[in-house]
Image: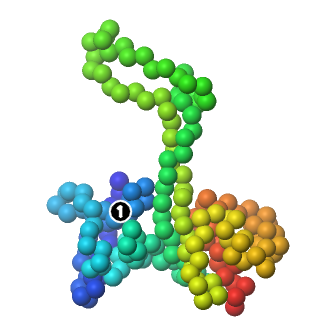
């Protein structure tokens, strides 16, 4: 895992430089100290975490990235989930049929290595939060955005089609939300 120069702004006003990495699959802020990987605790003492040019705030169950868009602020609750792809078959091909792994370690006197045939990939499961009409809104899917801005649904669907928006892509999701927040201005 890559660690990036960052800093912690504590609630007492002090700033601590540290190497940081946000583990989205476990929703933990990691840091390096004396070449050891550690989990950042005591979130209640942290005001803001800066990683490179990005800003994160503690939320109680992890950290959210604060992204300033042209038409408002968006808080990204970064999250990854395992998505089942199938079984690894011959020559690394994926198959939906169950594949049996045979242990040949006893025959060859090699060390036994666990070999799992199931193949998973990490999928984006981010939650985007922003203020709309005086309340805090959470959107996980494009459908959620369409519900929030129901009175502009036709314009939004046209924009999605024209721009080729894929809500699983963070840049596209932010572009769509920024477009929708522009209706309020």
Residue sitting at x 27%, y 67%:
40
Seen in the picture, residue 121 relative to 34 is either above or below; the reply is above
Q: Residue furthest top?
A: 107
Q: Determine if residue 98 is in view.
A: yes
For residue 147, which quarter of the picture?
bottom right
Please tell me whether mark 1 sits on a helix, a strand or a loop.
strand
Horizontal side of 40 relative to 170 (left or right) equals: left
Residue sitting at x 35%, y 53%:
1
For residue 73, which quarter of the picture?
bottom right
**In this view of the protein, which residue sits in the foreground, 67 or 80?**
80
Position in image of residue 161 (x %, y %): 79, 64
The residue under label 1 is: 28
Horizontal side of 166 relative to 113 (left or right) equals: right
For residue 113, which quarter of the picture?
top left
Of the 4 image quadrants, the one containing the C terminus is: bottom right
**In this view of the protein, which residue sits in the foreground, 144 or 8?**
144
Q: Residue furthest bottom?
A: 185
Position in image of residue 163 (x %, y %): 75, 66
Position in image of residue 146 (x %, y %): 72, 71
Residue sitting at x 65%, y 78%:
178
Q: Residue furthest left?
A: 34
Count of residue discs: 1
Position in image of residue 99 (x %, y %): 53, 23
Q: Residues within 10 Å of mark 1 (few under 14, many from 20)?
A: some
């Amino acid at each position: 895992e890559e660690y990036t120069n960052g800093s912690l702004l504590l609630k007492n006003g002090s700033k601590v430089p540290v190497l940081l990495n946000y583990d989205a699959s476990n929703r933990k802020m990691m840091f390096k100290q004396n070449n050891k990987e550690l989990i950042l605790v005591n979130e209640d003492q942290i005001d803001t975490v800066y990683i490179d040019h990005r800003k994160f705030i503690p939320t109680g169950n992890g950290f959210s990235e604060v992204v300033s868009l042209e038409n408002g602020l968006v808080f990204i609750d970064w999250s990854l989930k395992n998505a089942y792809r199938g079984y690894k078959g011959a020559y690394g091909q994926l198959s939906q049929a169950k594949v049996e792994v045979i242990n040949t370690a006893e025959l060859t006197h090699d060390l036994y290595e666990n070999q799992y045939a199931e193949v998973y990939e990490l999928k984006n499961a981010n939650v985007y939060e922003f203020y709309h009409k005086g309340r805090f809104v959470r959107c996980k899917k494009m459908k959620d955005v369409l519900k929030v801005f129901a009175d502009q649904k036709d314009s939004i669907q046209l924009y999605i089609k024209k721009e080729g928006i894929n809500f699983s892509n963070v840049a596209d999701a932010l572009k769509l939300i920024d477009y929708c927040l522009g209706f309020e201005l």
